[in-house]
Image: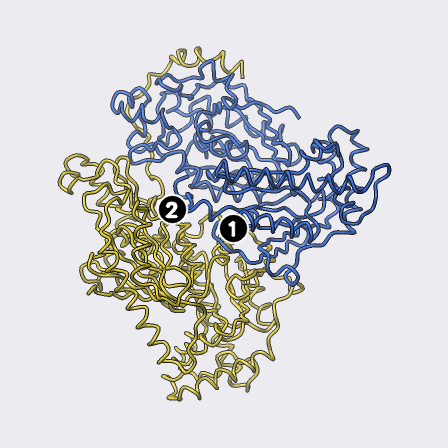
């Protein structure tokens, strides 16, 4: 992203080092952070030791670190071998990070591991200093039993180290490791670690400590993490019902709903109820300031908020024209848009990048709030969907988001789950095929990886 | 999905009953982030009102307290980044920030800096300074902050506080304000509880920010600053005035009750300008987090900023390929002279000269292939021999000039002829309008936001050499210009603008090049 471009990339290599006991939401934070940075076009990648441990034949990494730091021997395994293995593992993982910075011009690496001892953290700092990387530590600290249990369950089922086990056994294993770990845990604090750049989150008391932020980019990382709430949540997305302009194949405008669009709006409360169940009454509805989204929300009795940031991509002078008219009147623009749809700006209007940018407040609020239903427009939904599903920029403007469909998104540490419910009310397609003014999904949209919203298997 | 797809042909072709209307009969009225059309005229009036003291549209000494919109504006603040309806920015609701801390802990600076930043975002913000109110009442200064005095002083203090609370409440309810900042010591738990209860009852979120300064250089500098005003008011000598303030400070210390978790308030503890922060924030929300982001980057400044415009001529404006190195040298030598004179002045004017850190002059320059050459050149000419570190010349990509797109190399007449509609739009709203393939000032401000934070982080003297468009955005931020006057700011090529930081009000001066 042009405006986040960094003057001297070598001055701005950052390694975000996660710190905390297992099941404290570290993986969730890492994944979200990498997703957000990629969405902003900052090159970021998540690294975990788990992959290396598996390669070395160790399935229970946390015990290993425990062993390393206490000398306690696991049954049937010689301590010396493990020590050496663990050092090799650490070295290999750090080496991979170094290579990534160098060969791929990486900007932010996220090291998703426990890193609970000062010693381990010191050796990471040494590595960073050698390679001109700024370390920033992110500690997730929690005594909230419900929160931990919820994460334990998730880990047992999805994490690479445990998912091959029986769920009960896995859960027990995670708990065992947590308990072993607690003895060696050295949390970060202002006194002892006053020279480190760190942020410490406490999900129970909501207290947050921030220490020695040294660059703007570091502050931006902390800013994003401040907005994260680690509790599991759902978000519902819907386009407005079919509008009169949709029927006429005109883009933009502030038109009213068609008869079928009206029908969708009257059916929406029932669909929402079907998807949300008991949570339905807690849902807050966010719409844009344009009439068609408010009309779509008209029969929902929930609290409603309007956001100008959710208004449709402004087509400028092409507002209210059909694709055919645009092709005829502004052939160069029409072609330029297909070549680089993400960056293309209609005259006097906006590009997808502009939309993504103005969505920042919405995205941040979404990370904190629970039970939100967003009723908005095609381009805006594409940007929001791309954020949650880590869809690359070149592809996000080509995602097909059908009318009269409710999309439920459940972001989790290991996977984001998507469920769609169709209202079974016919509507036109507003999907424009690349290179033509033809509207309606081409056949190949179903075979492209991000072509169309699919339900994920749970 | 399959069924949806199968229905499509039937849908598109089978509408039948009603003939389709043509033309854009339900057009969108508001566009992008620009100010609502019906208030545009009022905004233009406001621009006129605000600019009437300027000669030839040159940068003026923008004053924050003067920047309240006139009554006709119905609470819309023409901020640079977004323009919002009253109280609606980010659905953040109404927020009161209460500062607390001992005298000399930079509370006034903090309140003004936050005000400047949130106004730039487009949030209608106002600072309420306890000291200003006291001045208005022309009361003896020692009652400013001391908590326990005779009954008469106590009663008086109560009256002032009631007046401020009342004014703040009116700001929220009558003037459509979204963020008020209360700048007073508030060192007693009881004071804080009263404030929190009163405003919470009125559905205003209250956030406390405690400023804790242990850096003695900052405290001394703050005392020095307040001495100036006391000396004037009471005819004291330098020593007498300093002693008076120090007495006040130590008395306050005995009454200080630091913010603590059991008060059950939302708060930020802010140590030595962002060295570390403790947050205990129950309200959260985007706007408050954005303020935290700002606080993480704010630093106590002793240096100045210098803006030197570069004449790009008819060159490709986005890449600076031809720079006259002699010209840059000349700029640097002029600014360096000024920096040194200022350094001597500071030492003469104070009993204890303060130097927070070595304060020579860095250069930030728009991207140019010649940046290395410039660096070598400047270092050869101006680096003193006993200084081990080189003079830094940073190339900043955010200083790329505004992209002119298809109006590049065109005169105003040619533009009017080629893009008549855009030209008219531009005349109405030069801040948000774009010509084809070009950037607006609004785009530029968004692109430059990281640079603003970097400047807030810096404590040095910095010389910024860039296109006037970039300088306008920077100037507009530090001098709290609105988006209405920003595009008209002038930067004559033979003059350099110096911005000096002051707690209440930044000032801008010209340096005419020799």
Residue at 57 percent of width and 35 percent of height: A235
**Residue A73 percent coordinates (x, y):** 83, 43
Q: Residues within 10 Å of mark 2 (few under 14, many from 20)?
A: many
Where is mark 1, residue-wise?
Answer: A218
Where is mark 2, residue-wise?
Answer: B446
Q: Please identify the quadrant where the C terminus of chain B is shown.
A: bottom left
* Total residue callouts: 2
**Residue B75 percent coordinates (x, y):** 37, 55
**Residue B463 percent coordinates (x, y):** 32, 59
Q: Please identify the quadrant where the N terminus of chain B is shown.
A: top right
Subunit of label 1: A
**Callout 1 and callout 2 share a chain:** no
Rendered position, A110 above or below B268: above
Rendered position, B93 above or below A452: below
Left or right, A131 with reference to A81:
left
Front position in the image: B290 or B23: B290
Which of the chains is yellow? B
Q: Looking at the rendering, which quadrant does residue B119 occupy?
A: bottom left
What colour has chain A? blue
Between the residue at mark 1 and the residue at mark 2, the CA separation in whole angstroms equals 19 Å
Left or right, B323 with reference to A184:
left
Q: Is residue A122 visible?
A: yes
Residue at 54 percent of width and 37 percent of height: A100
């Amino acid at each position: 992203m042009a405006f986040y471009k960094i003057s001297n990339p070598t001055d701005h290599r950052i390694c975000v080092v996660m710190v905390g006991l297992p099941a404290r939401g570290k993986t969730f934070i890492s994944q979200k952070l990498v997703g957000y940075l990629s969405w902003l076009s900052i090159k970021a990648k998540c690294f975990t030791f788990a992959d290396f441990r598996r390669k070395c034949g160790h399935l229970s990494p946390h015990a290993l670190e425990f062993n390393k730091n206490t000398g306690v021997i696991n049954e049937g395994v010689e301590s010396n071998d493990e020590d050496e293995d663990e050092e090799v593992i650490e070295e290999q993982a750090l080496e991979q990070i170094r290579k990534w910075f160098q060969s791929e011009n990486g900007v932010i690496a996220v090291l998703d591991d426990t890193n609970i001892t000062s010693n381990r953290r010191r050796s990471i700092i040494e590595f960073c200093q050698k390679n001109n990387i700024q370390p920033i530590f992110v500690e997730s600290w929690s005594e909230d039993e419900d929160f931990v249990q919820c994460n334990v369950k998730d880990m047992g089922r999805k994490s690479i180290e445990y998912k091959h086990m029986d769920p009960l056994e896995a859960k027990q294993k995670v708990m065992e490791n947590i308990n072993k770990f607690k003895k060696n845990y050295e949390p970060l604090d202002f006194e002892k670690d006053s020279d480190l750049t760190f942020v410490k989150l406490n999900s129970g008391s909501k207290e947050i400590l921030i220490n020695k932020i040294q660059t703007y980019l570091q502050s931006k990382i902390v800013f994003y993490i401040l907005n994260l709430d680690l509790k599991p949540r759902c978000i519902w997305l819907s386009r407005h019902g079919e509008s009169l302009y949709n029927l006429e194949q005109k883009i933009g405008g502030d038109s009213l709903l068609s008869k079928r669009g009206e029908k969708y709006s009257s059916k929406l409360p029932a669909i929402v109820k079907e998807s949300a169940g008991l949570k339905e009454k807690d849902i807050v509805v966010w719409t844009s300031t344009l009439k068609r989204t408010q009309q779509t929300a008209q029969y929902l009795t929930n609290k409603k908020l309007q956001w100008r940031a959710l208004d449709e991509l402004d087509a400028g002078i092409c507002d209210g024209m059909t694709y055919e008219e645009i092709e005829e009147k502004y052939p160069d623009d029409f072609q330029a848009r297909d070549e680089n749809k993400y960056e293309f700006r209609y005259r006097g209007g906006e590009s997808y990048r502009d939309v993504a940018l103005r969505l920042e407040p919405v995205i941040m609020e979404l990370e904190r709030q629970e039970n939100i239903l967003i009723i908005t427009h095609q381009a805006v939904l594409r940007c929001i969907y791309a954020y949650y599903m880590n869809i690359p920029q070149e592809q996000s403007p080509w995602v097909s988001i059908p009318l009269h469909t409710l999309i439920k998104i459940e972001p989790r540490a290991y996977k984001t789950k998507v469920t769609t419910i169709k209202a079974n009310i016919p509507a036109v397609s507003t999907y424009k095929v690349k290179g033509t003014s033809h509207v309606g999904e081409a056949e190949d949209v179903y075979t492209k990886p991000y072509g169309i919203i699919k339900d994920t298997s749970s | 999905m399959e069924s949806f797809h199968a229905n499509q042909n039937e849908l598109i072709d089978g509408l039948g009953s009603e003939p389709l209307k043509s033309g854009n009969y339900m057009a969108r009225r508001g566009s992008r982030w620009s100010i609502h059309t019906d208030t545009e005229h009022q905004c233009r009036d406001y621009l006129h009102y605000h600019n009437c003291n300027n000669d030839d549209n040159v940068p003026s000494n923008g004053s924050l307290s003067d920047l309240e919109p006139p009554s006709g504006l119905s609470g819309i603040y023409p901020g640079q980044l977004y323009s919002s309806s009253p109280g609606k920015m980010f659905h953040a609701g109404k927020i009161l920030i209460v500062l607390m801390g001992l005298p000399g802990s930079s509370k006034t600076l903090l309140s003004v800096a936050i005000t400047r930043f949130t106004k730039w975002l487009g949030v209608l913000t106002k600072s309420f300074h306890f000291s200003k109110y006291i001045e208005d009442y022309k009361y003896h200064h020692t009652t400013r902050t001391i908590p326990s005095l005779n009954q008469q002083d106590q009663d008086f203090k109560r009256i002032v506080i009631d007046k401020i609370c009342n004014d703040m409440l009116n700001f929220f309810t009558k003037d459509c304000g979204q963020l008020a900042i209360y700048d007073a010591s508030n060192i007693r738990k009881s004071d804080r509880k009263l404030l929190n209860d009163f405003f919470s009852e009125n559905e205003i979120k209250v956030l406390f920010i405690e400023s804790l300064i242990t850096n003695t250089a900052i405290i001394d500098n703050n005392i020095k600053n307040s001495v100036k005003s006391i000396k004037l008011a009471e005819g004291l000598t330098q020593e007498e005035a300093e002693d008076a303030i120090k007495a006040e400070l130590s008395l306050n210390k005995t009454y200080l009750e630091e913010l603590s978790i059991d008060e059950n308030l939302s708060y930020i503890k802010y140590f030595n300008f962002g060295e570390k922060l403790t947050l205990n924030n129950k309200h959260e929300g985007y706007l408050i987090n954005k303020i935290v982001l700002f606080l993480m980057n704010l630093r106590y400044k002793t240096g100045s900023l210098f803006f030197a415009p570069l004449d790009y001529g008819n060159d490709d404006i986005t890449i600076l390929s031809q720079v006259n190195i002699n010209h840059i040298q000349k700029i640097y030598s002029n600014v360096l002279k000024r920096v040194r004179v200022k350094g001597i002045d500071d030492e003469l004017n104070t009993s204890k000269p303060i130097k927070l850190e070595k304060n020579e002059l860095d250069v930030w320059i728009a991207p140019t292939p010649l940046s290395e050459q410039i660096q070598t050149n400047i270092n050869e000419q101006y680096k003193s021999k006993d200084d081990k570190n080189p003079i830094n010349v940073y190339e900043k990509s955010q200083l790329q000039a505004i992209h002119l797109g298809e109006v590049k190399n065109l005169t105003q007449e040619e533009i009017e002829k080629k893009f008549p509609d855009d030209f008219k739009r531009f005349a109405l709203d030069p801040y948000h309008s774009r010509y084809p393939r070009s950037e607006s000032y609004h785009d530029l401000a968004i692109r430059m936001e990281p640079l603003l934070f970097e400047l807030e982080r810096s404590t040095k003297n910095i010389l910024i050499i860039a296109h006037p468009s970039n300088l306008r955005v920077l100037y507009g931020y530090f001098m709290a210009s609105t988006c209405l006057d920003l595009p008209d700011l002038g930067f004559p090529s033979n003059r350099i603008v110096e911005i000096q930081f002051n707690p209440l009000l930044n000032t801008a001066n010209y340096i005419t090049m020799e």
